[in-house]
Amino acid sequence: MSDDDLEGISWDEFFEAFEENNLAMVYQEVTSGGEESRFAKLVSRDDA
């Protein structure tokens, strides 16, 4: 997927889809090596 395939949406649209799809965000603050992590993913709230 390239940037040309992406479509911008508003934050309101994002949060509406987030709620409609019952999503949660899972994230990691620190790596196992103690460094700042940028890992995050969206998952079903049923799986979180």
Image (spheres, rainbow, N blue to C red):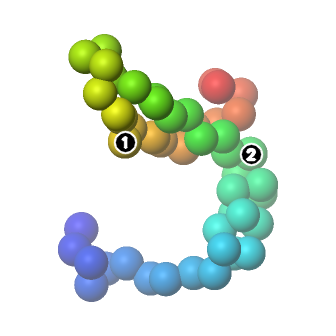
Mark 2 lies on residue: 22
Amino acid under label 2?
Asn
Dots 1, 2 in contact, CB < 8 A:
no
Q: Single out the residue that lies furthest toward the top.
A: 32
Which residue matches tag 1? 38
**Count of marks, rendered view:** 2
Answer with the quarter of the image where residue 4 lies.
bottom left
Residues packed near mark 1 inside 10 Å, few (<14), some (14 to 19) or many (20 plus)? few
The vertical placement of 35 against 32, above or below, is: below
Q: Position of residue 30 (x, y in %)?
A: 40, 25
Q: Residue 42: horizontal and vertical position, in percent?
A: 54, 44
Q: What type is the residue that disc 1 sits on?
A: Arg
Task: Please state the horizontal and vertical placement of residue 39, each as a whole percent of the image.
Answer: 38, 38
37 sits to left or right of 42: left
Q: Residue at x 27, y 78 (%)?
A: 3
Give the alpha-carbon distance from disc 1 to disc 2, as whole Å.
23 Å
Q: As drawn, is 48 to the left or to the right of 29?
A: right
In the image: residue 25, left or right of residue 4: right
Q: Nearer the viewer, residue 46 or 29?
A: 29
In the displayed structure image, the side of residue 26 where residue 17 appears, left or right: right
Which secondary structure, mark 1? loop
Asked if 30 appears above or below 43 in the picture, the reply is: above
Work out which quarter of the rendered image holds the C terminus and state it.
top right
Q: Quadrant of residue 11?
A: bottom right
Q: Nearer the viewer, mark 1 or mark 2?
A: 1
Decide which of tag 1 and tag 2 comes sooner along the chain. 2
Viewer-closest of 47 and 12:
12
SS state under label 2: loop
What residue do we see at 57% from left, 81% from top?
9
Q: Which mark is residue 27?
A: none
- The x, y position of residue 31, in whole percent, is 33, 23
Q: Residue at x 24, y 68 (%)?
A: 1
